């Protein structure tokens, strides 16, 4: 038993050293959260709409589209919002929003105040759709192909660089905008 206690610091040191070896590799980005949903069919969802008609996976299939999970209480969502507005106005991206664990009146107020970049917005009051997608926190954005498979996930607020280097080229390759 005493030997096991002497080995504990050595094992902890080796575990920590192993973590640092992996984390310090070239190209490792700690901000990238892997998603098991990549190349898998997007989860089935059917959500009531914020303003009129709701949205569902089946209703969006056929052409590539982008789904953005957001909330009025989310500060990074507000930082990302001008970029989403540019995408919808200038790039004509098929962008759909899902108000994640947000009160509908708060989501409406946000979109009235800052503009509405979305073709439609679904309400995910209980977070079930977000859970099915594997959302860690908002904002998160998913690129879905015409057959309904998730091709890319952006965790946190998207940047102009990500849009230019990743989203737009992938969307073009998938036959979108």
Image: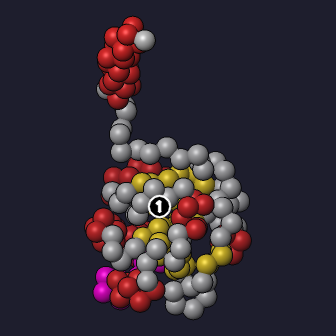
Residue 112, quarter of the rendered image: bottom left
In this rendering, position of residue 29 left or right of residue 92: left
Q: 108 and 64: which one is in front?
A: 108
The percent position of residue 46, horizontal first and vertical second, equals 66, 76
Residue 143 visible in the displayed image: no
Q: Judge whether 89 appears above or below 130 on screen.
A: below
Q: 81 and 92: which one is in front?
A: 81
Q: Residues within 10 Å of mark 1 (few under 14, many from 20)?
A: many
Residue 31 visible in the displayed image: yes
* Residue matched to label 1: 141
* Outermost residue, bottom side: 52
Residue occupying the point 40% across, 63% down = 139
Where are the magenta residues, as a range? 112-118
Please tell me whether residue 2 belongs to the stretch shown in magenta. Answer: no
The percent position of residue 94, horizontal first and vertical second, equals 53, 71
Q: 149 and 136: which one is in front?
A: 136
The percent position of residue 60, horizontal first and vertical second, equals 65, 72
């Amino acid at each position: 038993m005493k030997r096991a206690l002497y080995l504990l610091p050595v094992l902890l040191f080796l575990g920590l050293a192993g973590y640092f070896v992996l984390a310090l590799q070239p190209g490792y980005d700690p901000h990238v959260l892997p998603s098991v949903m990549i190349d898998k069919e997007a989860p089935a969802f059917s959500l009531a709409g914020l303003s009129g008609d709701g949205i569902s996976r089946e209703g969006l299939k056929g052409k590539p589209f982008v789904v953005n999970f957001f909330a009025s209480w989310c500060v990074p969502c507000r930082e990302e919002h001008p970029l989403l507005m540019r995408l919808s106005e200038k790039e004509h991206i098929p962008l759909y929003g899902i108000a994640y664990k947000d009160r509908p009146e708060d989501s409406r107020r946000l979109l009235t105040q800052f503009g509405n970049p979305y073709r439609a917005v679904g309400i995910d009051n209980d977070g079930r759709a977000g859970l099915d997608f594997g959302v860690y926190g908002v904002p998160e954005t998913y690129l879905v192909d015409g057959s309904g498979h998730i091709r890319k996930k952006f965790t946190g607020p998207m940047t102009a660089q990500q849009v230019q280097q990743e989203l737009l080229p992938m969307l073009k390759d998938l036959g979108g905008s």
